[in-house]
Amino acid sequence: MDNNLSVTIPRETVNDDKVRIIKWLKAAGAQVCKGDELLEVETSKANITVEAEADGYVEILCQAGEEVA
């Protein structure tokens, strides 16, 4: 059974196909609960905080400064 979940970035505007990761608020390997703040991203209009969608552990695959879909 695969227990890996990807973080879904909320789409703030129809023009944002990508966002930039500003910073991770949890370290790699940290245990998180659903609703914990994980990272801050920048859209074309605002900075937003993204929360964990489930309990688990953080695995960072994209670094701060990177643009992601």
Image (spheres, rainbow, N blue to C red):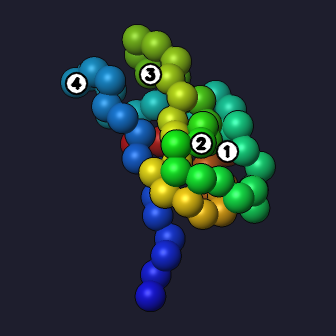
3D distance between C-alphas at marks 2 and 3: 20 Å
The quarter holding residue 29 reads bottom right
- Residue that sits furthest to the top in the current view: 45
- Which amino acid type is marked by label 3? Thr
Q: Which residue is mark 4?
A: 14
Above or below: residue 57 compared with residue 64: below
- Which amino acid type is marked by label 1? Gln
Looking at the image, is mark 4 or mark 1 earlier in the sequence?
A: 4
Q: Which residue is mark 1?
A: 63
- Residue that sits furthest to the left in the current view: 14
Nearest the viewer among 22 and 34 is 34
- Secondary structure found at label 3: loop
Looking at the image, is mark 1 or mark 2 earlier in the sequence?
A: 2
Note whether residue 13 is visible: yes
Q: Are marks 2 and 3 in contact (CB under 8 Å)?
A: no
Q: Which residue is mark 2?
A: 36
Above or below: residue 43 compared with residue 21: above
Label 3 crowd bin: few (<14), some (14–19), many (20+), radius 10 Å:
some
Looking at the image, is mark 2 or mark 3 earlier in the sequence?
A: 2
Q: Position of residue 4 (x, y in %)?
A: 50, 71
| Left or right relative to 51: residue 38 | right
3D distance between C-alphas at marks 1 and 2: 19 Å
Label 4 crowd bin: few (<14), some (14–19), many (20+), radius 10 Å:
few
State the mark number for residue 43. 3
- Which amino acid type is marked by label 4? Val
Label 2 crowd bin: few (<14), some (14–19), many (20+), radius 10 Å:
some
3D distance between C-alphas at marks 4 and 3: 11 Å
